[in-house]
Amino acid sequence: MCASWFVVQTQPQAESKAKRHLINQGFTAYLPYYRRRVRHARRNEVVSRPLFPGYLFVQLDPDLQRWRSINGTVGVRCILADGDRPRCVPDRVVDEIVARQDETGAVKLLSPVFSPGQAVRLLAGPLTEVAALFEEARDDNRVVLLLSLLGRKVRALASVDEVTAAA
């Protein structure tokens, strides 16, 4: 068997630490990240966030390498496994993530089909059928909407699957 990709679950917010320690042990580790604009204390910043919080990929050959040592690595919870064998991830999954990286190494997220200011409505949750305006994509799964509630505009976060264009 040749080297394949496997998924490692990390401790909370310890993805970078786990990656660093895995590389120090001689493993090939890959932590995909994306860039996100955040507003904090009236400042807008672009920050890097893990694409899969709490997880990273490690490449190894389980027949030749001592993969069980990964479970004792600083920052690592465990390597995902089926019984006593680590669970392999198809190479094409990691290849597709790598193919979406920009020149800085950040993964480019697919933007939703909505444009800023477009009228949308919610399909699920307590505000079902409420009209809103699309403001921005937060990440690949969430969007920020502007709702009119109680006479004022309120920002709300929703899953992209729960939003549709208003008719």
Image: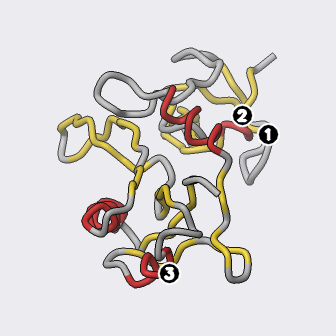
The image shows residue 32, relative to residue 11, as above or below, that is: above
The image shows residue 110, relative to residue 15, as above or below, that is: above
Q: Dot 2, crowdedness within 10 Å: few (<14), some or many (≥20)?
A: many
Residue type, mark 2 in image:
Val
CA–CA distance between discs 3 and 2? Answer: 43 Å
| Residue designated by label 1 | 123
Q: Dot 3, crowdedness within 10 Å: few (<14), some or many (≥20)?
A: some
Assign a secondary structure to mark 2. strand
The quarter of the image holding the C terminus is top right
The image shows residue 134, relative to residue 44, as above or below, that is: above
| Residue designated by label 3 | 68
Q: Going by the image, does 28 lie left or right of 137?
A: left
Residue drawn at x 18%, y 37% is 43
Q: Dot 1, crowdedness within 10 Å: few (<14), some or many (≥20)?
A: some
CA–CA distance between discs 3 and 1? Answer: 45 Å
Q: Earlier in the sequence, mark 3 or mark 1?
A: 3
| Residue designated by label 2 | 163
Residue drawn at x 62%, y 19% is 114
Which x, y percent locates residue 12? 40, 72
Q: In front of the other: label 3 or label 1? A: 3
Residue 120's image quarter?
top right
Assign a secondary structure to mark 3. helix
